[in-house]
Amino acid sequence: MKNTPFEDIDRILSAQKRYFDSGATLSIDFRKEMLKRLQKALKEWEKPLCDALWQDLHKSYEEAYLTELSIVSAEVRSHLKNIRRWARRERKCTPLKLFPSRSYIVKEPLGNTLVVSPWNYPVQLLLNPLVGAISSGCTAILKPSPYVPHVSETIGRMISGTFPPEYVAVVQGNREVNSYLFEQKFDLIFFTGSPDLGRKVMAAASRNLTPVILELGGKSPCIIDRSANIKTTAKRIAWGKTLNAGQTCIAPDYLIMHEDIKDKFVCEYAKAVTELHGKDIKSDTHYVRMVSDKAFDRVSSYLNEGEVIYGGELDKSSRYIAPAMIDRAPMDSPVMNEEIFGPVFPIVTFGGDEKEFSDKVSEFINGREKPLAFYYFGKEKTGWELIRRTSSGGGCINDCIMHIANENIPFGGVGNSGLGRYHKRESFEAFTHRRSIVTTCTLVDLPFRYMPYRMFSLVKKIL
């Protein structure tokens, strides 16, 4: 992927600043028209985008539509339906001490924004934030990942054919381009990527006091209690772990299960993977490949850090890694400390009764960085108790991944797994400044606030 020249970036950003300052993006009618343009473009470019996803990731049409395009389309529809209500000026209660004033919150766009996306869901994670930028009245520079060149090039053509560059533009390139972009003065940077890169983004943004939304990742635990329905649990976890070949920021990263059910679960997990992908997983059109040779080498190296008890077949020429489970990995090994981002599942087991198991699980999770997702399979009551005792960006009880599919609840991380949230109204709010305004009648002018503060004893009682 050829880098966009820095002088072109400067020219685009200057044009977007002038365009925003002109007030062209402020009307709700304009924003709705731009959302409709995006909606139309998604339909017209559905096949090229899905073809590009197949070329870069071996992602099937069905999976591309379900996990990428349909999510963006649903986001657009919800904004079209609700934007006028979300953008409406809000009347707030005014205390007696401010009589005769009225108080309001005005929703105004932050301004010129930058959206930087990763390679694992390159359509969804670039265009979903764009919906929030358009809905709130911002301009946007979009920076897709160079690791999926066909997708990035296709999105660039789609956006340039849909919006003028002074409103929405795509720039391409590697980390040199990213670094240059982060040095510029934006009104918001929306970044999705790893925690390590998130720290660099935040450090760069701090020099311009630029606010950031950081959608990061981490090691999301998947807990299986003795009370779990093992067959259903195995099928749901197998789907969540093999979706996009585990290259999902909210994929279950490692398993914590009761030692009494380990053998049974491993057996059911193997059956579930076969049901989902067939006996010859490598030939399944719904099984994605590692995005690069570097990713293949990193993920396959984890197989050497414990005892492989299921799967793990490799083919470097096609960057294929079969779903795998490993046992007895040392707690200080990379597979137990790095985000796996692949189809390898390390297993941690604990014993004891229900309370002892829960205590050990919560202690183990709380001893690590806060994850982006938390998954528990077993009694719902115990799941809620573990949620109360731990922290994560989001999660599920007796399911995994599915919380991201509900646009009515916010998505985001906490601590090491992210900063800020989006989806539906939260996306609108992410790109919006809530401006507090007090307006005061001039027909009445109470003397109490003026020096020399007469009747101060009465004022104290009012305050």
Image (spheres, rainbow, N blue to C red):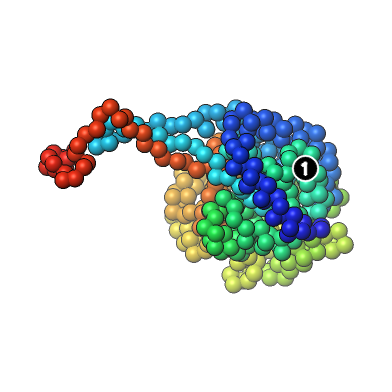
**Residue closer to the observer: 269 or 6:** 6
Residue 220 x %, y %: 59, 55
Residue sitting nearer the eye, 93 or 335 = 93
| Residue 103, image quadrant | top left
> Quick one: 428 or 228, which is closer to the camera?
428
x and y percentages locating residue 328 in the rendered image: 63, 68
Residue at image point 27% right, 36% down: 98
In this orientation, does residue 78 appear?
A: no
Reply above or below: 119 against 299.
above
Task: Determine whether the residue tagged by mark 1 lies in a helix, strand or loop.
Answer: helix
* Residue designated by label 1: 160
The amino acid type of the residue labelled 1 equals Ser
Q: Nearer the viewer, residue 435 or 375?
A: 435
Residue 218 appears left or right of 62: left
Tell me which corner region of the image, top left, top right, bottom left or bottom right, holds residue 302.
bottom right
Q: Residues within 10 Å of mark 1 (few under 14, many from 20)?
A: few
Q: Is residue 458 above or below residue 369?
A: above
> Which residue shows up at 24% across the image and 33% down it?
445
